[in-house]
């Protein structure tokens, strides 16, 4: 693994270059998000995003393939944080417990969402192309999360099932919270969704009406 970037001194040319690239990526992302909120995705062009961010069209393409990628860039950052957090959980911790504990490390994120997380969710629900891109990101995260769980000693098929169930729970939590205008603390809602997901499917939770 190349550790040059990690070991570079803070004021070295390479360190400065990487910081400038990160700042440019962030500026383009923020511009894309802002314009999409104000005008709707269909009315926003890559050129408009580049102008808003103060960069060239070519520079935009160096960082993002599409405007959808630019709007949803924060999804990838949260996914990376989640994967790292799961991998760093104690080795003997049961997998579902490790997943739930790792969720609490996302700050801001699905447990305590910042304004951007809420905004991205609402935009994805309104724009099919954003929703499709978001689902593609989640599909990749599901595969990566299953690999991390397998690396922790979980049987591969079980790893895939756990990853799928966990991410489905997160999507359900966040969209329910957004669509119902925050009826409860998000953490409480997340805990309840995860609890329900962990129940056997034929077990009726308290409050369910029996036929």
Image: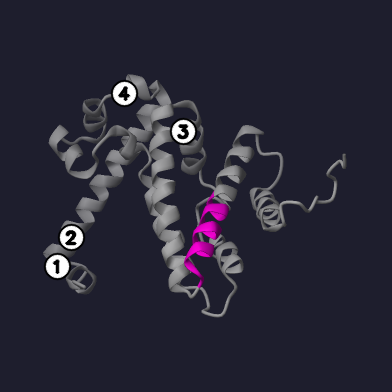
For mark 2, does the 10 Å Cα neighbourhood hold few (<14), some (14 to 19), or many (20 or more) residues? Answer: some
Q: Nearer the viewer, mark 2 or mark 4?
A: 4
Q: How far separated are the C-alphas under marks 1 and 2?
A: 6 Å
Task: Give the residue displayed 49% in from the left and 75% down from the top.
Answer: 153
Q: Secondary structure at mark 3?
A: helix
Question: Where, quadrant-wise, is the C terminus in this rendering?
Answer: top right
Identify residue for label 4: 44
| Circle nearer the N terminus (3, 2) | 2
| Circle nearer the N terminus (3, 1) | 1
| 77 sits left or right of 206 in the view | left
| Circle nearer the N terminus (4, 1) | 1
Q: Nearer the viewer, mark 3 or mark 2?
A: 3
Q: How far separated are the C-alphas under marks 3 and 4?
A: 15 Å
The residue nearer to you, when weighing 52 against 184, is 184
Identify residue for label 1: 12
Q: Which residues are magenta?
A: 154-167
Identify residue for label 2: 16
Q: Secondary structure at mark 4?
A: loop
- Percent across and percent down for residue 171 are 55, 44
Question: Where, quadrant-wise, is the N terminus in this rendering?
Answer: bottom left
Q: How far separated are the C-alphas under marks 3 and 1?
A: 40 Å
Q: Main secondary structure of the magenta part?
A: helix
For mark 3, does the 10 Å Cα neighbourhood hold few (<14), some (14 to 19), or many (20 or more) residues? Answer: some
Q: Secondary structure at mark 1?
A: loop
For mark 1, does the 10 Å Cα neighbourhood hold few (<14), some (14 to 19), or many (20 or more) residues? Answer: few
Q: Nearer the viewer, mark 3 or mark 4?
A: 3
Q: Nearer the viewer, mark 3 or mark 1?
A: 3
- Percent across and percent down for residue 110 are 54, 50
Identify residue for label 3: 124
- Percent across and percent down for residue 208 are 83, 44
């Amino acid at each position: 693994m190349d550790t040059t970037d990690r070991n570079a001194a803070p004021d070295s040319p390479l360190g400065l270059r990487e910081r400038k690239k990160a700042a440019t990526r962030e500026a383009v992302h923020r511009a894309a998000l802002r314009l999409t909120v104000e005008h709707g995705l269909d009315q926003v062009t890559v050129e408009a995003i580049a102008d808003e961010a103060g960069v060239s069209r070519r520079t935009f393409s160096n960082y993002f393939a599409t405007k959808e990628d630019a709007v949803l860039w924060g999804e990838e950052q949260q996914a990376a944080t989640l994967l790292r957090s799961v991998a760093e959980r104690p080795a003997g911790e049961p997998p579902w417990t490790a997943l739930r504990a790792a969720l609490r490390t996302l700050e801001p994120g699905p447990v305590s969402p910042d304004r951007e997380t809420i905004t991205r969710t609402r935009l994805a629900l309104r724009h099919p192309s954003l929703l499709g891109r978001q689902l593609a990101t989640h599909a990749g995260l599901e595969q990566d999360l299953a690999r991390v769980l397998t690396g922790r000693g979980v049987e591969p098929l079980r790893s895939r099932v756990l990853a799928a169930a966990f991410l489905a729970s997160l999507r359900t939590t966040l969209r329910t919270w957004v669509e119902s205008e925050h009826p409860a603390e998000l953490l409480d809602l997340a805990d309840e969704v995860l609890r329900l997901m962990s129940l056997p499917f034929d077990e009726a939770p308290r409050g369910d009406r029996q036929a």
